[in-house]
Image (tube, grey):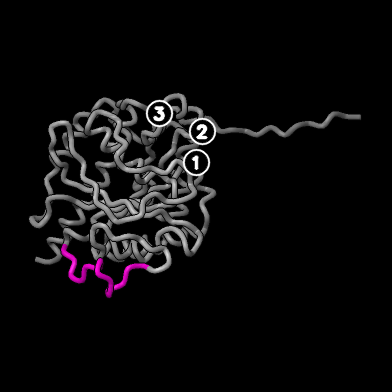
Amino acid sequence: MGSKQSKQVTTLPDFEKPWRNMKWNEKKSLEDELTNIHLRHPELTQLRILLHGPVGAGKSCFINSVRSIFSGEIKRNIPEQSNAKKSCTKTYKSYSITNKRSETLPFIFNDVMGLENIEDDGIHPNDIVNALLGHIKEGYKFNPVSPLSNKDVDFIHEPTLKDKVHCLVSVVPANSISRMDNGVIDKMEVVRKRAVGLEIPHLVIMTKVDANVCPLVNEDLSQIYRSRKIKEKMGNCSDRLGPTMKCIFPVSNYHEENETNDTKDVLILTALLAIVKSANEYVEESLTSHE
């Protein structure tokens, strides 16, 4: 009897040269630029960045990672979810970033309850839209079944530019983007369409790039833009969530380390700078549109 021939799976090699340039040795200049960025609207002292995405994607972890970078030590202030079962974010709260010189940076984050496919669990997409419009007061407790209405005490009837969101950021995990539930994707699409209609910039943070997604990146994070697998995952993000590739930024949050490292820091700071610049351009356009 003839022996069966096993099928060989051909794996395309990684790219010889990086397909996106990175300033790996310019951590300090990135920090300085983010600290000293000039806000382009006289009413604002901070830009508001809203993070949303599925449960366990790393939204709170991303904020803690940014805090870690600017303080120079690992921060654990904001509760993080180590699995994808239940969101640990229950209320609408703003998070400022302070550097080693005790300076408050000119942007704040808002983290919201994670999205789930189950209708009576996870944040209702209408509450994310309410946040975009500036209708939600600090401390509002999310109700998955009943989103905020204009009759609630936590509803801001006449939001100012300060209350509104200046950049929407979707946070999704690289190791499961292709398997994300269509129900969650649909909810994210509802929010994205409303943001686009309001001309609010929308960017994507792709987390968990070193969670066994690509051997090259697992071994050396600085090779991330030589990785064909990471580029494929970014393509999946673009296809499923809508933004173009230039609006998608792969990062590795701090989740098990006890000290910071420059490679992770530069990757996160580069993504953050793109987010802050997009938010700043949005508020500048808001100013000119009312002149």
287 sits to left or right of 171: left
- The amino acid beneath tag 3 is Leu
Identify which residue, 234 or 207, lies in the foreground. 207
Percent x, y of residue 116: 47, 57
Q: Are marks 1 and 3 in contact (CB under 8 Å)?
A: no
Q: Which mark is residue 155?
A: none
* Placement of the C terminus among the 4 image quadrants: bottom left
Residue 123 horizontal side relative to residue 176, left or right:
left
Q: Which mark is residue 212?
A: 2
If you read the primary sequence from the N terminus, does the residue marked by circle 2 or circle 1 appear first?
1
- For disc 2, the neighbor class at 10 Å (few under 14, some 14 to 19, many from 20) is few
Does 142 sit above or below residue 273? below
- Say whether residue 137 is magenta: no
In the picture, the disc for residue 221 is 3
Looking at the rendered structure, the kind of residue marked 1 is Asn
Among the 4 quarters of the image, the one containing residue 1: top right
Pick out the residue farthest to the bottom: 151
Say which residue appears at 46% left-offset and 46% top-offset. Answer: 235
Residue 4 lies, with reference to residue 53, above or below; the image says: above
Give the residues drawn in magenta, as a range: 147-160
Residue beneath label 1, please? Answer: 175
Assign a secondary structure to mark 3.
helix
Could you tell whether 114 is left or right of 215 in the image?
A: left
Badge 1: how crowded within 10 Å, few (<14), some, or many (20+)? Answer: many
